[in-house]
Structure formats: C-alpha cells, structure tokens
Amino acid sequence: MSGAGLAAQDLTLQLGAFALRGVSIAVEPGAALVLLGPNGAGKSVCLEAIAGFHRMASGRIHIAGRDVTALPPEQRRVGFVVQNFGLFPHLSVAENVELGGRARGNHIDVGSTLERFGIAHLAAARPTYLSPGEKQRAALARALASRPDLFLFDEPFAALDAATTLALRDDLARFLREAGLPAVFVTHDYAEARALADQVAIIEAGAIRQHGRAAEVFDHPASLTIARFLGIENLLEGRIAAVDRERIRIDVGGGVIEAARPDTAVAPGQSVTLCLRAENVHLHPPQSSRWRAIAAARVVAIRPSGPLWTVTLDSGFPLIAYALPQTAQACALAPGGFVDAEIAPTAVHVLASPRGAGLASDT
Amino acid sequence: MTATPQSSALSRSGSSRIVYLVFWLLGTVLLAIVVLPLLRLALQPSLAGLAAAIDDAEVRQALWLSVAGAFFAALFAALFGIPLAYVLARSKFRGRGLIGAIVDLPLSVPHTVAGIALLMVFGRRGIIGEPADALLGLRFWATLAGIVVAMVFVSAPYTVNSARIGFQSVDPRLEMVARTLGLGPWQVLWRVTLPLAWHGIATGLTLTFARAISEFSAVVILVYYPMTAPVKIYELFLRFGLDEASAAAVLLLALSLGLFVLFRHFAYGTTIAGAGR
C-alpha cells in the first residue's frame, strides 16, 4: 500500500533490550492516528523510526506515495513536534520558522507565516519567553514551513497543566483539520487520545495490539489488557446463560446482565468478561425505572471526581457509575441507600475470557 | 536547633541569617588567601621598575611567547578536544569511563612529572621528538611548538570536560527536530548543537587559555629557552631578587587578568563585576 498518507509496514528493530516487533500502521491524509500505550511500550521509538532515526531490521515506510525506508530524516519530509515543542532556544521565533523553510531550499514568507498563526508580534522573541500556546503555534509554523508530507507529535503536552492542554489540544485539532496532512500523535493519556484521534493504534511491548477507528477501539477493546489500559471501569467476569437472536444473557455471579449479541460465535456456558464504561451505567431513583434496570443496587461509596460523582454500587456484583450532582440529588444517593442502575445492552462489550474460545481473544 | 512547622517566619529567617553570616565569614578567609598576595604583589614594584620591565625586550618577548603559546594551546584543545567531548557526551560505549579518566589524568599528575614525561616523548631523543625532527624538521625543544605541547598537556582537560557538559545539556530531541526540518548531520552540529553548547565550550577554552598562560613546571622542563613569562620571572627572581621579578610578575598578572576578563566577556557576556545574561 502506498497511498497519499502514511503506510508503515512490519517495522521491526532492536534497540538495546527493547524491540519493535512487526509494527504496521496506516494513516490517510487529513486523519490523525493516535498511538496509545503505557510508558515504555515503544510509542516514541515507533515515531522516531518513521522519522528515520533508527536502523530497522525489516519493514517499509511510505510517506505520500514515496518509499522513504532508506532515506535519512532530513529527506523524509516529516514535521516533528516533541514535548515542550522543541523550539531552538538560541534563535528567535522568526529564525526558527525561517530555519524550517530554508533548510529544504523552500522560499517562504516568514512574516505572513507568522501572521497566519497569529504570532507575528513575537517574531523577534526568544522561545523561552513564550507561553505554551505561543510555543505550539511557533512549532507548527516552523514544521509547516518545511512543507512536510506527514506530522509526527511526540507527547507535546506531557509537561503542561490540564487547562492549558485542553486549550492547546483544540488549537492543534483545528490546525490538523486545516492542514489536511496525515498525523501520528503519541500519548499515554486516554483523554488526549479520545479528543484527537480519528484512528487509534494500541501499542504495548513493541507490538500493535489493536488498530482501528477511534470509537471502535475505545468501545470494543480487543483484549482484557487493552480494556484495562483504556481505563474501562467495570470489567465483570461471567458465563453466558442464554443466547437469543439479538441478545445474550450473562450470569455474573450475583446477577444477570444483558448484552447485544456479538458478531462472533457464542454459546451458553462460555466464560466471558464484560466491559462496561461507568458513564453507561445510568442511575434512577429506586423502583422508578421502566427499563431493564438492575433494581435495588446498594450504594457502597460516593466520592467526587471533577464535576461528577463516582458511585460504587453493589448489585450482587461490584459496579461503578458516574452521576451528575443533580442526579445524585434526585436519587438521594447516600452510602447504604439504594438506587436503580440501568445498563443499555448495546453499551456492554463482551470479551472471551482468556481460556474461552470464539469472540475476541486475549492476545 | 530544629525549626518546627509552628515556628514563626521571623525566627526562621533569623536563624538562616546566622547561617549566611557564618558562611560569609568562612568564604572570606578563602577570598583573602587569593586576593591578599596578588594585591601585595601589585603594590610591590615602583612605577620606574614597571617601566623598566616594559622596556626590557626579553620580558616583552617572554610575555608574547606566553600569550601565543596559550592561544595555540586553546586552539589545539578546540580542534581536538571539542570532538572528543562530543563523542563522550553523546555516545555510549565500553571504556567511556576510562577515556574520561585519561582526559582528567593531567589534573592529578604533578606538572614537573608531566614535564619529564613530555621530555621523554617530545625531547631530542623522544619517541616522537626524534623522528619528527628527522622527517619533518619539526622540533619540540627550544621552540614555540614545545611550549604549546606542554601547555596542551596540562590545560586541555578543562576544554574537554567543560565542552562535554555543554553538549550534555543540549536536548538530543532538538537535534532530531532539526534533522526533520531538512538539516544534515553537519548542519545540525553547526547550527543547533554548537550554539547551544557554546557556554560550556567557551568556559572550557577560557580556562584552558588561563591555565596554559600560567604554566611553569611542564614548560620549563621541556623548553627552557625561549623563556615564557613564568620562566622569565623565575629566572629574574633567582638572578636579581624580588624587586626585579615582581615588576615582570605584575605585568604578567595584568595581562592574564585582562585577557581572562576579555574572553569571558566575548564568550558569554560575563563581566568581572557580576554574571551577565
């Protein structure tokens, strides 16, 4: 495959004790792929390999239809943005941008480039004195001045506070939409991935564990390990009790949960793990629910987390839910009290347990 | 005395003031040991004595030789020491610690010992000195080349160590970014790495120059004639005594101090009165 975007196939390399093992990712122009994984998973190494900083044992990389596998970094035409944005501290903003343009012999109008990014007034400033937002714009302006075919972002927000990150993330998403270039964004932060990704690739121990559309990966993790990494709050082990045309019923010990029937083969008696996000557990005052509620869940604990309350329930099995303060009030939530917990069957993702067969297996 | 969390800010600042006062007193002892002899020396020669020393062609020649030798020693350290510093800072290899120790070795070798060792290598019958003379006509005895070799031996570690710290302070990711912007490895070195490591490099070169211009032992053993300023001062002291020697000594002191301040100023905008930037 060698379309207009990025196609990296079977990237394999050894770096001391760490190995990248057969990594393949693809990104279309205008789309953002988020490479998501825990620390030490190989996200940055993967990005650096695409940029040309590691000798690979095997694999091919195509960027904008060009085979760049054998090219040095300076000939690959990638815009690389690193943590803290990587501006050269000994050069002014204008000189940083100019360097990005001139190195490849491009004629660029530095003034109008800075204008476009809203930082013309900072042309003579040294990067040290810039705010994070200004740094990001300067870094993007510089990268764009080098006329890249691909953008690579290596945790640019890692050192910033939450509020700043939020603002910069929106800025970046807008920029990427307008630039129409493929982008690979590395992060270990689930929320960041959720906000930026069109596509997601989960990387762990140097190998891609799951790769697909963002919503697909986030809602249907391929394994328990991924589900845990994605922070899915409710992971319940159970056994399939009954299967009908659209639904399956799963016995989870102290109760039964209904789930939409997965595409894969299922049979009664099979061991499975249910993945259910806390935001998909809806709370109602006791006995008011007309839906398939798990009636009379006992409230074990309530604690504030940001604007929401995290509610720990006992429905015969442990369950975690989020509640808005007004919901908490309407339900008169209090430890020891009772509440109705409603779970939409379509929100339940069914994973085969490690020893089970069929379904998505834990690899 | 332990400050509890309940103790007032006033008493805490009071006790820290006492710590500062004690430290200042202790530091002043050290400063006195440095300043007092130099100040006393500066007041020793009469104006007529100073004028006579300036008028002395041999003294002028010795001063010039010291400056030229130190300049070439610093140049040599830059040319061969900065690349070594870069390698030590940026690559991991077996034996890196050993090479680092070799670089530091001249700092712990007595300089008379260094002079004798250098004589065995660069002297008339030295393992390099003899063939260099026979094949190239290059002599390390009675020449500026010999003075420079002795100066390099004792002063190069300052450049290597300081430049190494300078290179280590440059984020390798900045170099990566520069590569992706289209710069080749040499361009990255020239336009990103060296400018960012400059503070360390400049400090190292300044210290190398300062150490070289003041070197006596290693130089005097390898090259007695022509005399550098420290050797000339020693000779004046032996032949004529304190007054004659002190005039030349003050001239060397003024010259080294002046150049030192000048270098620091040009290298990274620091004045003797305080830190710049």
Image (cartoon, rainbow, N blue to C red):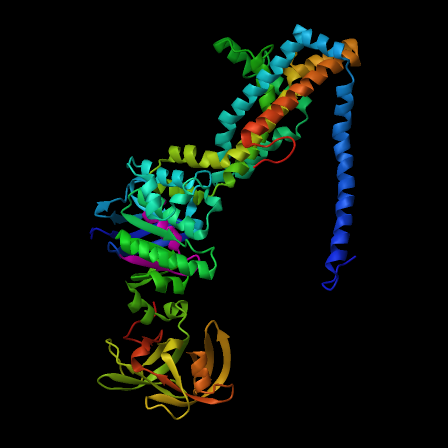
Viewer-closest of A286 and B276: B276
Q: Would residue A51 be counted in the magenta stretch?
A: yes
- Is residue B144 rendered to the left or right of residue A213? right
Viewer-closest of A169 and B30: A169
Q: Residue at x 35, y 37 (%)?
A: B183
Number of numbered discs: 0
Counting from the top left corner in percent of width and height, residue A337 is at 49, 89
Counting from the top left corner in percent of width and height, residue B126 is at 58, 15
- Is residue B30 rendered to the left or right of residue A214? right
Question: Which quadrant does the N terminus of chain B fall into?
Answer: bottom right
Counting from the top left corner in percent of width and height, residue B209 is at 59, 24
- Is residue B225 rendered to the left or right of residue A43? right
Establish if B63 lies above or below B111.
above
Question: Which quadrant does the C terminus of chain B fall into?
Answer: top right
Counting from the top left corner in percent of width and height, residue B222 is at 63, 15
Establish if A170 lies above or below B117.
below
Q: Residue at x 47, y 71 (%)?
A: A306
Q: Residue at x 44, y 38 (%)?
A: A91
Q: Which residues are magenta?
A: A31-56
- Residue B262 visible at all: yes
- Residue B87 visible at all: no
Viewer-closest of B72 and B25: B25
Q: Would residue A8 be counted in the magenta stretch?
A: no
